[in-house]
Image: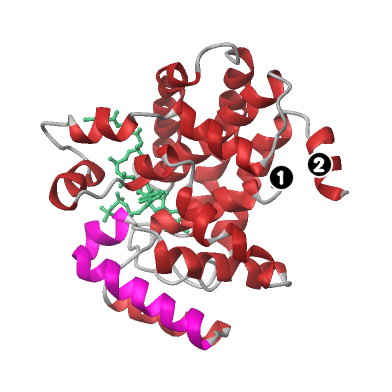
Amino acid sequence: MAGTALTESLSPPSVATLAADALRSEVWLTPKPGLVDSANNGSHDDMDLPLFLRSIDAIAPWLHQFQAQGQQDFLQPAPAMLMRIRPAGLACEQAMFGATQGINAHKGGIFSLGLLCTAAGRLSAGHRPLTRQGLCAEVAAMTQGLVERELQHCRQPATAGERLFQAHGMTGARGEVESGFLTLRRHVFPHWYSETHPERRSLNALLRLMAYNPDTNLVARGGLSGLHFVQDYARRLLTSGWQKEDLQQMDQALIARHLSPGGSADLLAVATVLMAFPQ
Ligand SMILES: CC(C)(COP(=O)(O)OP(=O)(O)OC[C@H]1O[C@@H](n2cnc3c(N)ncnc32)[C@H](O)[C@@H]1O)[C@@H](O)C(=O)NCCC(=O)NCCS
Ligand SMILES: Nc1ncnc2c1ncn2[C@@H]1O[C@H](COP(=O)(O)OP(=O)(O)OP(=O)(O)O)[C@@H](O)[C@H]1O
């Protein structure tokens, strides 16, 4: 069985390589509503595709670092891991900002994929099976209590994510990892094989994410009405069936409203990595 062969043959560094490849596929995938892709810069005045590729080149070595640290620390209790990898996470963010002249191309992606690579390192070093479910559970275990510690107890919100928790109770990237990527498990994985062509499969997964992910990027730019606009639009396309032209029209609608579903782009990359593993 292909899935079993993958579990046995995936040597640890391959997961970090899969993650960098997933970031590259995500940015090349076109048309992506509101996001940077090969046709346009979506709702972003300060980013383009070459900037994303430079950012990925800067991040890639750190993804291996996360995995190595997961392997090295596999005997540590899971909840101790986030504190241990955060310095590498912040250094990776700095490397990204260095490559992009201070522009946030991948902050969310570094966070989610860094945790995923660490989880993979821990599972492989502990001779535990590298499965989708196991990886999601390990990410959840490593981030247990994160929303309470960093969002509920945050007195002076500094980031958009922290402000949006206070304003709307949105838990953003932290809530998604603490739930073991619940949005992916509930709304994306069960429908992954409903499309056979790889490009349509990725675009359909992105559409499903836009329909169901409580993306703090959308609320930061367009308020709750911005989030609902994107969710309603994506749900309509999922119901009626869609072609690339529909996504191009949706792109124009999001650009006109300055909306960008960046959190969904990040989760698409996470899904691409996780779908390389057996269930
Ligand atoms: C947790 C991270 C992502 C910071 O999050 P932040 O508060 O800036 O906001 P937010 O939760 O909206 O996430 C930022 C990025 O995550 C992505 N994202 C947004 N929504 C989602 C979602 N629902 N699911 C997954 N990713 C998402 C987007 O790309 C977004 O740009 C990370 O950069 C980090 O750990 N920073 C250190 C911050 C810290 O230690 N603060 C102290 C607490 S007061
Ligand atoms: N292809 C993509 N296009 C745009 N954003 C993406 C893409 N892939 C991932 N993202 C995510 O979107 C986030 C950037 O979104 P955004 O520019 O809205 O954030 P910001 O810089 O914090 O806010 P603003 O630009 O409104 O000041 C990044 O953290 C990144 O992880």
Of the four image quadrants, the one with ligand 1 is top left
- Secondary structure beneath label 2: helix
What residue type is disc 1 on?
Answer: Phe
Q: Nearer the viewer, residue 106 or 202?
A: 202
In the rendered view, would you say 93 is above or below 85? Answer: below
Q: Which residues are magenta?
A: 216-240
In the rendered view, would you say 188 is above or below 181? Answer: below
What residue type is disc 2 on?
Answer: Leu
User: Image point 66% across, 26% down: which residue?
Assistant: 123
In the rendered image, residue 207, in percent from the top left (x then y), is placed at 49, 70
Would you say 172 lies left or right of 164 here?
Answer: right
Q: How is the image coloured?
A: secondary structure
- Secondary structure beneath label 1: loop
Would you say 242 lies left or right of 170 here?
Answer: right
Q: Quadrant of residue 80?
A: top left
**Residue lying at the far left of the rendered structure:** 155
Residue carrying label 1: 277
Mark 2 crowd level (few <14, some 14–19, many ≥20, 10 Å Cα): some
Residue carrying label 2: 6
Magenta segment, prevailing SS (helix, strand or loop): helix
- Marks 2/1 in contact by CB < 8 Å: the verdict is yes
Query: What label does residue 77 carry, if any?
Result: none
In the rendered image, residue 141, in percent from the top left (x then y), is placed at 48, 28
The verdict on label 2 being within 8 Å of ligand 1 is no
Q: Quadrant of residue 89?
A: top left
